[in-house]
Amino acid sequence: MKIYRYLHEGRISESSDVPPGAKLLAPAAPTKIVCIGRNYADHAKELGNEAPPEPIIFLKPPSAVLDPEGTIVRPAVSQRVDHEAELAIVIGKEAKNVKAADWRDYVRGFACANDVTARDLQKKDVQFTRGKGFDTFCPIGPCIETDLDVSNLRIRARVNGETRQDGSTSQMIFSPAFLVEFITSIMTLMPGDVILTGTPAGVGPLNAGDVVEVEIEGIGVLKNVVA
């Protein structure tokens, strides 16, 4: 089932249908966004890195969340802002020390996400916080799909209609089940928290006026403009 979160007549609601005139919102309001770096070997290679022996995790702030159809704002301090199409896992209940075999019991569903990155700042700083953490740098949507096998889904990014990324979740180095176990052994995840599971090869720059789309099979299309 697809669950949409929207603003209508001054109220935020969730349902499987969006009423006419409603503003579509990001389908989750996380307390934290846990991201996985280099979880696709081809993406690690294109950035000149080896595939990691264990997950590389970093955080995006909740203030980075952007609604579907919202505007990604390129910061003036960066000359290179990239798209990264990703499968998002949305947590459904408090999760600590979850076993991989039980991971699905703690997951509400899945969404499309764009791990927007100021690539030049990421390289300059070495660690990821500034380059990944700007306001508007985490579009999520258009919905949460609650019933989906995510082991082999096509994931794509398009910029102005041109396909830039085209991969499959089957190419992940660390599976969603492994990631939930790994992350919850470190920190407690709360309902609404989001895990971004990494991006396939093909990341590239976004410029003012671009329209960027992230499409994941079985979920839908997340569309944003760039300013």
Image (spheres, rainbow, N blue to C red):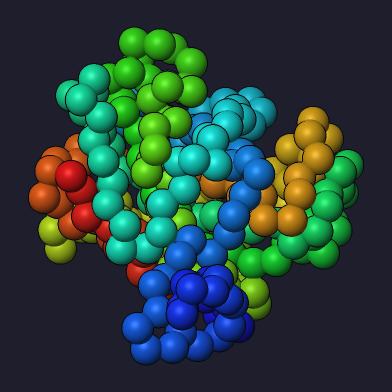
x 30%, y 26%: residue: 119
Note whether residue 21 is visible: yes
Q: What is the number of callouts on the image?
A: 0
Q: Quadrant of residue 178?
A: top right
The vertical placement of 145 against 183, above or below, is below
- Say left or right for 70 vs 52: left
Residue 84 point in image, percent of width and height = 36, 44
The vertical placement of 42 against 79, above or below, is below
Residue 58 point in image, percent of width and height = 58, 29
The vertical placement of 188 against 7, above or below, is above
Residue 168 point in image, percent of width and height = 45, 58
Q: Quadrant of residue 20?
A: bottom left
- Say left or right for 44 vs 175: left
The vertical placement of 175 against 79, above or below, is below
In the foreground, 38 or 219: 219
In the foreground, 201 or 67: 67
x 47%, y 48%: residue: 65
Q: The N terminus appears in which quarter of the rendering?
A: bottom right
x 51%, y 28%: residue: 51
In the foreground, 144 or 62: 62
x 46%, y 65%: residue: 25
Note whether residue 219 is visible: no
- Say left or right for 227 vs 33: left
Q: The C terminus appears in which quarter of the rendering?
A: top left
